[in-house]
Image: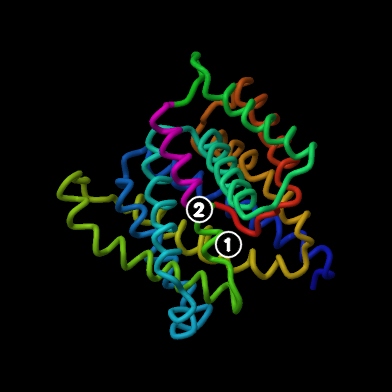
Amino acid sequence: MLPPPMRLAFFSLFVLIAFAGNSVIARLALSGGDIGPWTFSLLRFVSGAMILLLLARPKAGWVAGRWMAALALCAYGVFFSFAYLLLDTGTGALLLFASVQLTMLAVAFQRGERMRAVQWIGLALAFGGLIYLLSPGLNAPSPIGALLMAASGFGWGLYSVLGKGAGDPVARTAGNFARAGILLIIMTPLILFISPEAAPGISGIGLAILSGTVTSGLGYALWYHVLRDLSVTTASVSQLSVPVIAAVGGAIFILEPVTLSFALSCAVVLIGVGLATIKFSSQSSD
């Protein structure tokens, strides 16, 4: 049996790898053409809802969910999948993470919270790093892919705001995932009529379910467990590692190169976001 500090560190590391794993798994499944982006999203949320409802108990989970939060969750998941048709793993994770944090920062500002000078400097650094990453050049990511991932980050940031509330966070997440799955099922005939997708392969189905059950469902459940023993600042700062872990995973499993421009922009964005969000710490991530 591990002592409590080591157990907390182990669980925290697992959660951060799970969050980064969502990007690696999505890119791995979608870049190979084993599954379409809509089908990937559908299987991810339906399987995630099933494991979360089991953990939270179906009735308690369903009651705790909210339809508006589920709609924001759908936006996050669908834009996330379509973006990874066009973006490398690390770049997508960086854009997602920055968009989430900046969205929540904007919400906090709109609600009357004000930033200190160091936080304004951090915000300027984050935007500067993103501008450098997206500037025209040999290594610039797809503009459409970047826009889709920014929309995904906005959806997750909005979900993080709407998903907060009293009660069991695992049950609340289960209810939101269940509602998101229902919404995607209802929209599937229309979406596939407008933009048909080939039948998914076994590998694509397996990766989508892996993303839904392990790196999403179990990852989120364990994250809420870990948060009880982490300070808000530690929880926020620890998430700065997610894009880096995702980039390493992309290099190992998908053989994606980690360029100097990405490394520099990643460092600048993460330092900036860390400074800007230190007082508006989020308890959620992808």
Determine the residue positioned at 53% across, 76% down.
171
2 vs 12, left or right, is right
Which of discs 2 and 1 lies nearer the camera? The answer is: 2
Instruction: Judge the density around disc 2: few (<14), some (14-19), many (≥20) Cα neighbours within 10 Å.
Output: many
The residue tagged 2 is 156
Q: Position of residue 254 (x, y in %)?
A: 49, 36
Residue at mark 2 to residue at mark 1: CA–CA distance: 16 Å
> Which residue is drawn at the image coordinates 55% and 26% (left, top)?
257
Query: As shown in the figure, which amino acid type bears the numbered disc 1?
Result: Gly
Q: Percent x, y for residue 59?
A: 44, 85
**Residue tagged 1:** 219
Name the residue nearer the viewer: 101 or 85. Answer: 101
Nearest to the observer: residue 163 or residue 192: 163
Rendered-image quadrant of the N terminus = bottom right
- Membership of 149 in magenta stretch: yes
Q: Name the residue located 18 percent from the left edge and 57 percent from the top edge.
A: 189
Query: Which residue is found at the position 42% from the left and 64% from the top?
Result: 68
- Examine the rendered structure and indicate whether residue 132 appears above or below residue 237: above
Q: Which mark is residue 3?
A: none
Q: Secondary structure at mark 2?
A: helix
Pointer 2 with pointer 1, Cβ within 8 A? no
Most common secondary structure along the magenta stretch: helix
The magenta segment is 142-155
Q: Is 46 within the magenta?
A: no
- Residue 260, compared with residue 190, is above or below; it is above
Q: In this view of the protein, which residue sits in the foreground, 105 or 185?
A: 105
Q: Secondary structure at mark 1?
A: helix
**Mark 1 surroundings within 10 Å by alpha-carbon count, few (fewer than 14), some (14 through 19), many (20 or more):** many
